[in-house]
Amino acid sequence: MKLSTSVFVTILSLASIATALPVKADIINPQSLLIAQKKITPVTRLTRKNSNQFFITIKEGEFNFKGTLRRTKGSTFIAEDRQVRVIYNRKTSRIVVINKKTGTEYYNYIFSTTSEGAL
């Protein structure tokens, strides 16, 4: 009987110690969220090579594309890799990125020539 009483007291003691231990909570610092958001700022750069070609760099989150846009007709320039086709219309300043397999538009936006890397 004495043994079972001491086992019971030991179990109660361990339980009370476990509940008294401090627990550390992860706190998200709002400043670190702002820094993380700034690191994924989308970047589009167009550099004119000649009248029929532009070099383009697009970074959007984990999406990266680098290639040479070639004039197809009028003011339309196209570049592609295995996954996407990038179309730039110089007259409207619109850039469209299309998934080649599904035909889905990833991005469709107007590129401002006053931004960094402008023409």
Image (cartoon, grey):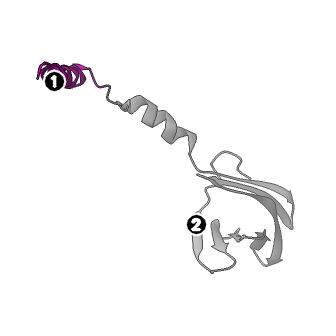
Question: What residue appears at the point 41 percent right and 29 percent down from the top-left corner?
Answer: 31
Q: Which residue is mark 1?
A: 12
Judge whether 78 appears above or below 35 on screen: below
Question: Which of the image's four quarters has the N terminus?
Answer: top left
Q: Position of residue 113 (x, y in %)?
A: 65, 54
Judge whether 34 appears above or below 113 on screen: above
Q: Looking at the rendering, which quadrant does residue 107 occupy?
A: bottom right
Q: Is residue 21 left or right of residue 30?
A: left
Question: What residue appears at the point 77 percent right and 70 percent down from the top-left corner?
Answer: 80
C-alpha span from label 2 to label 1: 61 Å
Q: Position of residue 77 (x, y in %)?
A: 77, 71
Q: Looking at the rendering, which quadrant does residue 91 occupy?
A: bottom right
Residue 14 is a magenta residue: yes
Q: Label 2's element?
A: strand
Judge whether 18 appears above or below 73 on screen: above
Q: Which amino acid type is shown beneath numbered disc 2?
A: Tyr
User: Circle 1: is it few (<14), some (14-19), or many (20+) Cα within 10 Å?
Assistant: few
Checking the image for residue 50, the label placed there is: none
Q: Label 1's element?
A: helix
Q: Looking at the rendering, which quadrant does residue 25 occupy?
A: top left
Q: Which residue is mark 2?
A: 107
Point out the tag, 2 or 1, that comes first from the N-terminus.
1
The range drawn in magenta is 1-23
Q: Is residue 107 left or right of residue 119?
A: left
Q: Which amino acid type is shown beneath numbered disc 1?
A: Leu
Residue 72 is a magenta residue: no
Q: Nearer the viewer, mark 2 or mark 1?
A: 1
Q: Is residue 43 left or right of residue 10?
A: right
Q: Position of residue 72 (x, y in %)?
A: 82, 78
Question: What residue appears at the point 17 percent right and 21 percent down from the top-left corner?
Answer: 3
**Main secondary structure found in the magenta portion:** helix
